[in-house]
Each structure stands twice: as structure tokens, then as C-alpha cells.
Image: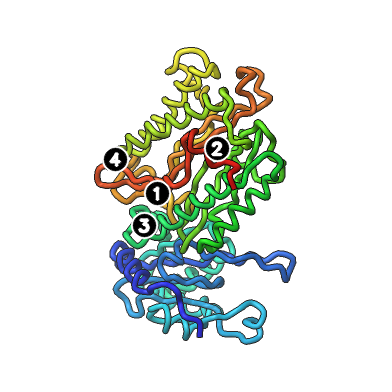
Amino acid sequence: MRKPIYDMNIFSERRRLVGQEIFGSALVVASHPEHIRNHDVHFPYRQDSNLFYLTGWEEPESVLILRPGLNPEAVMFVRRRDPERETWDGFRYGPEGCEREFKIDKCYAIDEFEKVAPVLLKEVDRVYYRLGKNRDFDERLQTVLDSVKQMQGRTGIGLLPIYDADTLIGEKRLVKSEYELTQLREACEISAQAHLAAMRFTRPGVNERQVQGVLAHQFFMRGSAREGYHSIVASGNSATTLHYNFNDQVCRDGDLLLIDAGAEYNYYTGDITRTFPVNGKFTDEQARVYEAVLKVQKDILDFVKPGVVFKELHDMGTSLLTDAMLELGLLSGRKEDLIQAMAQKKYYPHGIGHWLGMDVHDAGLYFKKGEPRPLEPNMCFTVEPGIYIPADDSSAPAKYRGIGIRIEDNIRVTSTGSENMTSSAPKEIADLEKVVGQN
């Protein structure tokens, strides 16, 4: 019998805290669809973050129904044991193993969902569920809700109303517990060390994919289960493409290399971007743009503390980067007019950052009741200013064309300021020039 590697008390406590918000209701969370292509070609499976957050369960074809205050309270539907399929696909816990090992009150086989779920949901007055994430399961749940309505007879009770589960669970996931911070810090440190190894490996003539291989090797050797997202390894003008994903070009002498990559550790992910010269030495033009972006990032990090509104960080990034573009000669005119016209988006088309946790763009509202929310201790997010000047931009000074720079760190709000969880990855020019190519 395979034993879970996580402490199940963590997940039962999370269910208790979420359940406090929805007495009289039910929460339904389905597993992520299984990735299968070309019949027998399987891809590594990663559980839906919300389902894992509440259960620690990693098998596909699974559903949690949480009914706070009712008996049974936590109910799961999972795949049956199947020796033949397990020979091909690996061990399954089955309903009995799930109930025994995962602190679940009652487990059923997933093929019993349409029969049992209506009985469970008949006792609640609303359902929390995320529509649109799993279209196939949406249809199954609709069938169940129709059955619940039919069971009510001519009582005048219609379909149970559905409320967004992502908002409910996301607000719990947004402020990290000490356990979560431990996992996230480890993900950040693995990511930082991988970036450092990639810097040391990089030199003119290596391929972007080889650099990606160094990152992946470091991730797995240091305990990561997977990449947090597809790594961006973009040299030269490719760094001006925000989501460049070919990673197949030769890194050339004189070019910059932008790496945006992060490791996932126990379902928490790092998200670091570093930009450095392939040959280990910034040109004067590269250094000027780089220092402008770095100064913006430092100024924003110094500003982070509880009570600051997250939108202020976005606005600050826009303002400071517009200043930098004016100084570099990328833009001209009155700053306020440029921002009003969104002229800065030509060279800085994204925001300053995003929540970070179990997903690289993590759950949690940025606005509450229509107002931008203030930062609280143990919220975690990225700060990632950038300037991207395409090689074919004839309006930019020729000396800056083809330069793309982003600098991204992972930040935790403390009681008085912030903690940079990715500070192990060098970003000062002098430090970068010491390590690049020194493998």
C-alpha cells in the first residue's frame, strides 16, 4: 500500500476553515482533466490546485463534496481499484484507501457520482462550484442538479444556485500559512539555484534549449516535481517577446539572455526572471537599460508593506518605467499625457506582478467590493518590471533596439515591509558579470 507523503491534518484543517464560510451549503471540487494524447501517450498529471489544497489527493477522475455540519461532511468520489489498469498506469487507492489514508468521511467510486451526489446535495441550499474549468464535469454536475430538483417534487424549489468556488477558496489561499510559506520558500530557493546554474553554464554558442536543460536538471535534482510553468529562455531580440517559448536559438556573443523560469515544490511554485549578457559583459547600452529596470524594481520593493494597495504597485511601476523611457529617449513628451495615452505600453505591456502560490498566477481577488485591496502580511506575489525594445522598432534609438529586460523576484509581505524569497539569484550587474560563463 502506497502511503501519502503529506500530513493529512493540514488538509482537514483547510476543509474546516473553508467550511466555516458556507454552513448550509456544499462545495464541489473536481479533479483536473487527465492529459492523454494519441491514445497511449500519457503526460505527467498535475492535480487541480483547489482539490489538492483541500485533500492532498493527486489522482484524476475524482470529486470532493464538502457539506459543513452534515454527516458525512467530506465525501469523495474516486476511481476503483483495477489491477489491469494499475499494471499500465500505476497504483490507485480506490474508495477504501482514500477514506482510510486521506481523512475523508466517506468515499464512493466515481461511477456512482450521478446516483449518490443528488442525495448529498438534496440537504443543502446552494452549491459552490467553478463553472467552465472542466466542461465535461460541468455536464455531469448539471445532471446531478437536475436530479436534485426532481427529488424536490412540487415544492416550488428550483435548481440549486451555484456560487463561484474559486473566489471562496482563493481568498483562503491568498494569505499563506507557515506551512505554505515553507513550501513556497523552498520552491523559490530551488528556482534561484537553478537560475544561478544556468548563468554559470551560459556562454556564446550554447543553445537556449541547453540552458533550459540546465534549469530542469537543477529543478529535479533539488526535489522539484515539475516546472511551475514552461520556461522562457530568450536570447537577443527574442527577449522582447513576452511569452517566447521556442527556446531553440543559439545564444550569440553580444546578446542578452532573458530567463523566466520557476520550479514547483509540493504544489507551490517559484517564478523568477533574470536577464544577463551571454558573454558575461554588459555593453554600455545594455547596462543603461538594465540599471533603469533594476532601480524601478528596487524602489517598488522598498515601498511594499501592509496597507499598501496592490494597485499602487502597478501604478508606481507605470510611473517609474515611463520616467525611465523618457530618460532613455524611447518616449518624448509630458509624462502624464503619455500615461493617459498608454504610450508606455509599447515598451512595457504588462503589469508589475501577480499573486504567487500553488499556481504561478495564484488565486485571490485583486479587488474587493469594487475597491483595490490592501496588502496583508503573508500575501505573496511577484514584482517584475521590464522594458522591451524590438529590433525592428525604427522609432527607438538604434543603440537600444533588440534589448529586452525583465527582472522578477518573489515577495512575501511581512509585518513591516517585505521578504525577497528569491534573493539568492544574482541581479546586480557586478554579481552577474562574475558568475555568467563561470561553470
Q: CA distance from mark 2 to mark 1?
A: 18 Å
Q: Which labelled disc corresponds to residue 421? A: 1
Going from N to C along the chain, the mark reached first, 4 or 1, is: 4
Please tell me whether residue 394 is drawn above or below residue 20 in the rendered image.
above
Where residue 49 appears, as percent x and y from the top left, is 47, 61
The amino acid marked with disc number 3 is: Leu
Pointer 3 residue:
181
In the foreground, 154 or 190: 190
At label 2, which amino acid type do we have?
A: Thr
Q: Is residue 175 left or right of residue 153?
A: left
Residue 305: mark: 4
Secondary structure category for the residue under label 1: loop
Identify the mark nearer the N-term, 3 or 4: 3
The residue tagged with tag 3: helix, strand or loop?
helix
Q: State if disc 1 and disc 2 touch (CB < 8 Å).
A: no
Tag shown at residue 288: none
Q: Is residue 394 left or right of residue 303?
A: right
Q: CA distance from mark 3 to mark 4?
A: 17 Å
Q: Give the labeled residue for mark 2.
A: 275
